[in-house]
Amino acid sequence: MTIRLRPHHLLCMLTYVGKGYTDAFCTNFDAITSRLGDGEEILVVAGPDDVCAPVETLEGHHCHEASIVARDAEAAASVADLLGIRASEGARLTLDAARLAALRTAFQARTIRTACADCEWSALCDGIADAGYPGIRLTASV
């Protein structure tokens, strides 16, 4: 199968430690990080994706807001520049240990974090990255 991710979730997955909007969100993201770690392919999509699924219908959720669409564009550009790949809608990629390490190094150095401006989870992600990624759920086995 293929995991559908919007571009800014390519950054969110780096610091995911089991915290999120709801229990259903966390259960879902746990399953996604497991599949990603096993090398399952990512299809980059515009708009709500497999991560958003448990919260997309919550009233007031931001999945469709213009600021999130802008966040996706910034994340796609940052990831593409770093990895030398296309990371916008329709792109397909897989994660391996080298790509994941490159993403986390750049994230920790804050060189791919422009998409994270004004994100409500930014402080949590800062702390996780600054501490060396303790408790992260996504590890690459491929």
Image (spheres, rainbow, N blue to C red):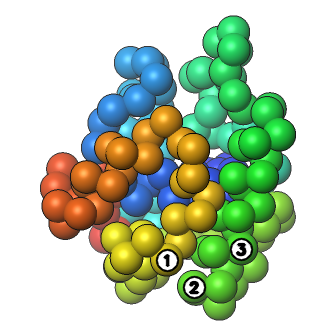
Residue 136 placement, left or right of 69 = left
Residue 113 placement, left or right of 115 = left
Asked whether 74 or 36 is in front, the reply is 74
Question: Which amino acid, by three-letter code, is at mark 3?
Answer: Ala
Q: Residue at the front extreme?
A: 118
Name the residue that disc number 1 marks. 111
Name the residue that disc number 3 marks. 77
What residue lies at 73% left-to-right and 37% top-to-bottom?
Answer: 48
Specify the quadrant of the image occupied by residue 107.
bottom left
The residues bearing labels 3 and 2 have C-alpha atoms spaced at a distance of 9 Å
Residue 85 shows in this picture: yes
Q: Position of residue 112 (x, y in %)?
A: 53, 72
Question: Which amino acid, by three-letter code, is at mark 1?
Answer: Thr
Q: Is residue 98 above or below residue 115?
A: below
Report if the CB atoms under discs 1 and 3 are less than 8 Å apart: no
| Number of other residues with Cα within 10 Å of mark 2, as a class: few under 14, some 14 to 19, many 20 or more | some
What residue lies at 63% left-to-right and 39% top-to-bottom?
Answer: 50
Asked whether 94 or 123 is in front, the reply is 123
Report if the CB atoms under discs 1 and 2 are less than 8 Å apart: yes
What residue lies at 77% left-to-right and 61% top-to-bottom?
Answer: 73
Name the residue that disc number 2 marks. 82
The residues bearing labels 1 and 2 have C-alpha atoms spaced at a distance of 9 Å
In which quadrant of the rendered image does the C terminus lie?
bottom left
Residue 10 placement, left or right of 5 = left
